[in-house]
Amino acid sequence: MTLKLTRRRTLAGTGTLILPALIGASLLPREAAAITELVAAEWGGDIVEAMKQIAARQSAVGFNWVLFQGGAGSILPKIKAAWPRVEYDYVAGWEGSFYGMMAEDWVETVSIADVPNLADIPEKIIVKDKKGNWKAVPRAAGGIYFGYRTDTAPIKITSIDDLLSPKLKRAICWPGPTQSMMLQIVALALHGGGSETNMEPGWKLMKELAKSGNIGRIAVTDVDFTNSFTSGETSVGFFAEPSWAAVAKNFPITRLTKQPGMKTFLYQSGFAVMKNRPNTKLTLEFINFAISPSMNTLYSQIAGEAPLNVKASAPSNLAHLSFAPAQMTEFVYVPDYRVVLASQDAWTKRWETDIAPLLQ
Amino acid sequence: MPLALLPAALILGLLLLAPMAGLLVQSFRHFTPGHVGSDVGAPLTLANYRELLNPAIVGLFVETFRISAIATLIGLVVSYPLARCIVRRFSAASRVACIGFLVALILLSMLVRTYAIELAFGSVGMLRPLLRAFGASPNSGWYIQCLVGAGLLHYLIPLSTLMLLGTVQSVDPRLADAAQSLGAPAWRAHLSTTLPLSRPGLIGTFMVGFTFSISAFVIPMVLGNGRILFISNTIYDRFSDIADYPSGAAISVVMLVVSLTAVGILSWLAGRPAVPE
């Protein structure tokens, strides 16, 4: 048998196709760069959509959007590899990733002089370093909490103990070890009388849950969770507000944010401005614009997170994340994120050795 | 060393050996929780390797190699007759069409083919009601393992078939004919002539398929429901999500050593004579 396909012919054919394309591309007219383009690292889905709409309402800067491949922490190794030639002007994140960046001394200090709209954001929630310098600009608050799909969940969930019910066989979508900074285990620990500094009750309960066979999917990305819920594969979970909001667009959801014994974890999302970039002033001006009352309201409506600018208005569909002072004590838990961050390595390895083998 | 090899040696040294050396050094560094990677000048330690002795991590290695070996063997069993059929039975036109089809399958994006399997057979797939009707739970552990194996086979079968075409073609068909003319049944003629002469090609194909399988990342991530993970996924988690470079580097180095040992043994087997002299 003699095959007609030879290496010489393949190379000649490939060259014949590629060369004209390259020449053609080089001859195309190029638009001159009229405005400065900032590189922004953001979450995908509704969050980047909200930021795109805010960016469209100003003309001072253009944007090259880079999306996280996983959680906000997934950008940190990329910055580490490139530092100090980092290409991101700002990196969106939350307390967990902010403290990681601060430990590496990557972020600029911000002040009201740089970002005047910071005056309308409560100072006590601004992330600070050990010297009290402000290191991130908050834009919204979100919650991570338990919930279930009302139309498909086999039972009504009223407590964490219900997660062990035999009726929930393979019905739970549980966050993977790199999701939500393991607050899901902290939630179990709180139920057992522990906390982020005493996780043993959480690990004990997690083992029981893994052995129960009730976990149908371990979500390693946000999309895993929404796919699993919208397809009906699973019905019960512990995820962040934007993920619940994505499912709630098409299916009835019961959010357990004010259920006794089931804590809601509050976090803030915001902007960290990277050092060593040539566009710091423009970046800060854009951030100031983005947290202005009208833009913060717009962000909140699209992204599904509560605005942190006191002059912005929160959409009515976030009422479940609005807590009276007495409710804050009963239903809300804000962990020490420095402890949570420092424990990620140990907790992830513990998951791999103690929990993962029980899930197969 | 001939001068002509200098460019290749430089590229190999710059792009492969230097990063690997960096990885090796990183694997011995101490990691401070909360930081990204090891600190500059971090002390050296064996702790990153010691933690790999945990039975759960050893189990992860075993699981990766087990599923990969089974999928590669099944791929060979399917591909060899297919390759023989294409070479010996098909007309020239059908042969070209088949080879073109196999090449197209190889070039198909890994993500596309993996999500195609997930959407058809996965626990969120279209066939989910059918599977449940037959009493099979698309969320059960054994089913997910099968699904990961199917994902690997989707790539392994076209790859192995293409590789085995040359092997089958190089075996003289008259040897099997001669065996049959001397009274051997067809199956025995092939087992005693075609198969032993194909052994180096089969082992080589197994090596390539096995290497691909154990390093698979997307397939277990998408089809494994987060419950079946390969070593590659763990390495990614260590580097990307918890930024523990030293631990990720230690797993990578162990994975490399184990893989090279397996390939070395297989190469040695391939080099031995097919029929004892």
Image (cartoon, grey):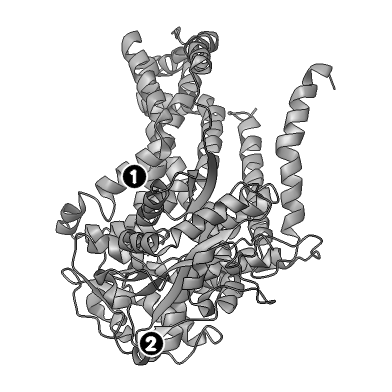
The subunit letter for the residue under badge 1 reads: B
* B193 in relation to A203, above or below: above
Give the residue number, with chain letter if any, for mark 2.
Answer: A328
Q: How many numbered marks have been drawn onto this rendered protein structure? A: 2
Estimate the x, y position of residue A298 in percent, counting from the top left.
Answer: 34, 59
Task: Name the side, left or right, on which B129 lies relative to A349.
Answer: left
Q: Residues within 10 Å of mark 1 (few under 14, many from 20)?
A: some
Estimate the x, y position of residue B106 in percent, counting from the top left.
Answer: 42, 30
| Residue appearing at x 51%, y 52% in the figure | A41
Q: Secondary structure at mark 2?
A: helix
Along the viewing direction, whichever of B249 and B144 lies nearer the viewer: B249
Task: Name the side, left or right, on which B199 lies relative to B76.
Answer: right
- Residue B183 visible within the image: no
Q: Marks 1 and 2: which is nearer the front?
A: 2
Whole-number angstrom distance, CA of label 1 to CA of label 2:
42 Å
Mark 1 is on which residue type? Tyr
Task: Name the side, left or right, on which B122 lies relative to B61.
Answer: left
Give the residue number, with chain letter if any, for mark 1.
Answer: B115
Along the viewing direction, whichever of A352 and A147 lies nearer the viewer: A147
